Amino acid sequence: MHVDVQEVQTKIIMLINKAKAGEEILFEESGEVIAKLVPTQRKEKVSDRIGAMAGQIELADDFDAPLTGEEAKVFGFE
């Protein structure tokens, strides 16, 4: 996307939103590219991960019950 510098004042919020969405914005003056607006690398927040699988995983009521002797052998605990 190419944008004239004078147009930036009226379009800056739209341009920032496009950059957030991953688009590279090139700024021109007199037909020459003078600057570029690019999206930054977004760091994943812990809050983005917590609960990401909510409703997609089911645990048995006894998931934390002690292992039987046979189960312990299978997992190498005996």
Image (cartoon, grey):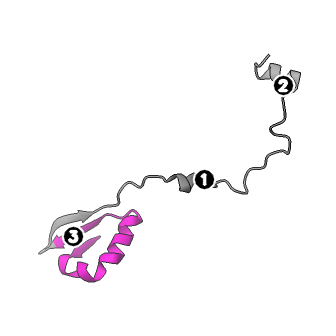
**Left or right of residue 2: residue 39:** right
- Furthest toward the left, the residue is 30
Q: What residue type is labelled 3?
A: Phe
Q: Which of marks 1 and 3 is in front?
A: 1
Residues in magenta, as a range: 1-28
Q: What label does residue 32 carry, if any? A: none
> Front-most of 53 and 24?
53
> Front-most of 27 and 10?
10
Residue 55 against residue 27 in the figure, above or below: above
Residue designated by label 3: 27
Residue at image location 34% in from the left, 70% down from the top: 16
Q: Position of residue 66 (x, y in %)?
A: 84, 31
User: Helix, strand or loop at disc 1?
Assistant: loop
Q: Where is residue 35 in the image (x, y as percent from the top left)?
A: 19, 65
User: Helix, strand or loop at disc 3?
Assistant: strand
Residue designated by label 2: 71
Q: What residue type is labelled 1?
A: Ile
> Front-most of 39 and 46?
46
Number of other residues with Cα within 10 Å of mark 3, as a class: few under 14, some 14 to 19, many 20 or more: some
Q: What residue type is labelled 2?
A: Glu
Number of other residues with Cα within 10 Å of mark 2, as a class: few under 14, some 14 to 19, many 20 or more: few
1 or 3: tag closer to the N-terminus = 3
Residue at image location 55% in from the left, 56% down from the top: 47
Quadrant that contains the N terminus: bottom left
As measured in the structure, the alpha-carbon distance from the residue carrying label 3 to the one carrying label 2 is 65 Å
1 or 2: tag closer to the N-terminus = 1
User: Helix, strand or loop at disc 2?
Assistant: helix
Q: Which of marks 3 and 2 is in front?
A: 2
